[in-house]
Amino acid sequence: MSETILVVGSGAREHAIARALAHSVQRPRLLCFSGVSNPGIVALSSEYGLGSITQQEAVVSFARRHAATLAVIGPEAPLAAGVADALWAAGVPVVGPKQALARIESSKGFARDLLARYGIPGNPFFRRFTSMDGVESLLTEYANQHVIKDDGLAGGKGVKVCGDHLLSLEDSLAFCRELVAQGHPFVVEEKLEGEEFSLMSFCDGETLRHMPAVQDHKRAYEGDKGPNTGGMGTYTAADHKLPFLTDEDIGQARSINERVAAALAEECGAPYQGILYGGFMATREGVKLIEYNARFGDPESLNLLTLLESDFAAICRAIADRTLKDVPVRFSPLASVCKYLVPEGYPDQPRKGDPVHLPAELPRNVTLFLSAVDVKDHTLVATGSRTVAAVGTGASIAEAEVGCEEVVRMIPGPFFHRADIGTERAIAQRVEHMKAVRQA
Ligand code: AMP
Ligand code: GLY
């Protein structure tokens, strides 16, 4: 049967998903449904629908109208809104967990409790709150050692870290009071120290197939300075580990993902079918969990889907059919570096509407993915968020970085990127930092 695959969402992550599906030997027909138009995805799709991706009926009616045989949901918001449940109910199998299972991302307290209840290692000390009762004494006990998290999805704005965003007990109390006033439950947890990494696994509810480890860079400016962003760039190594991680770290992260998938199946009485994304920190006491996401990372997925050698459409079908153990999942033994070009002022006051001139030709080892762009009067324009991502591959991280950097620099205009991502200097600093953390 020839597939008609619906991609929900339209950032660079979904551009990478659509491109990987388009490369399948099965030549699936592609559909996309999203709130905005992404010209990179438009070029790959036979139908492109505009509408709200969190409205179940809107997504289902588009899927039905165009006879989708499979759907891949990119972002977290539709998963949290139960769009996977609605598509399954309409007879369309989905890559992306149902609402109850997506709580692993949509409720930080649920994720922490799940680990605790099933004896899965990786939790720091944590406590859940819905009022100010007991908050002050806990913040005092963990003075300068705490992180406060809005329990629900907050678009990256719900986490405040002591010493970073919270500079005094009063700052911390004020943030908690704000959350209580908004009626948002929250979690206070111990601040961890180490190096962060992402480890994602394809999951059909039983079998997990792990992807190479990736490191993201959340801060807007070089040297990890400035405000937090959705992620400015990422890298992976040719051996699919990261230079600051041990085999044991990778083993621990994989094992946590496996045990979480099993715990979710038991807790929810249903299989987790989609991408399970563990956000981890390698610490002196081993690998700890920062958070779970119920979807591909952005930009992590740009690296991973560029490196994926196996047929992505076959993997998606196997996730939906629960036959993942029977399909090959291989990534090429290359390193990769991804950098996002973003508008001046991003993330707080980004410029909007500047033309984006892409290079006419790209080196063979570099791919471009479009994100927050639109077409106005036949010109590509930036719409005010992460704009274009370049992914370079190579035998080493350094080689991948050179290709990626060269292409990002070819795009003129009032944009910026992080030149330091993937450089030997930046990576050596991370290795040194991890060495110091392990010896502390
Ligand atoms: P999240 O939205 O959960 O990814 O958190 C955003 C960022 O906050 C993470 O990428 C970490 O840098 C930081 N963070 C979250 N939890 C902790 C923690 N327990 N200890 C230290 N840093 C944390
Ligand atoms: N790269 C971080 C995220 O996708 O949440």
Image (cartoon, grey):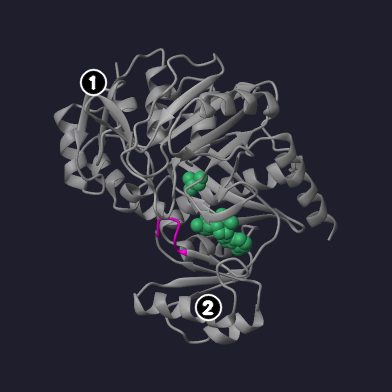
Q: In which quarter of the image is the N terminus?
A: top left
The local crowd at label 1, few if under 14, some if 14 to 19, many if 20 or more residues have their Cα within 10 Å, is: few
Amino acid carrying mark 2 in the image? Asp
Given residues 273 and 362, the one toward you in this image is 362
Given residues 15 and 309, the one toward you in this image is 15
Q: Mark 2 points at which residue?
A: 171
Does 333 sit left or right of 75 as displayed?
A: right
The magenta-colored residue range is 154-158
Could you say where residue 224 lies in the image, as x and y percent from the top left? 62, 51
Does 171 sit left or right of 312 as displayed?
A: right
Q: Main secondary structure of the magenta part?
A: loop
Residue drawn at the location 54% of the way across and 31% of the way down: 303
Does 220 sit left or right of 191 as displayed?
A: left
Given residues 184 and 436, the one toward you in this image is 436
Q: Which mark is residue 46?
A: 1
CA separation in Å, label 1 and label 2: 51 Å
Is ligand 1 less than 8 Å from the beta carbon at label 2? no
Q: In which quarter of the image is residue 36?
A: top left
Magenta span includes 157: yes
Residue drawn at the location 64% of the way across and 25% of the way down: 402
Q: In which quarter of the image is residue 242?
A: top right
The local crowd at label 2, few if under 14, some if 14 to 19, many if 20 or more residues have their Cα within 10 Å, is: some
Magenta span includes 123: no
Amino acid carrying mark 1 in the image? Ser
- CB within 8 Å, label 1 to label 2: no
Could you say where residue 233 lies in the image, as x and y percent from the top left? 55, 39
Closer to the chain start, of discs 1 and 2, is 1
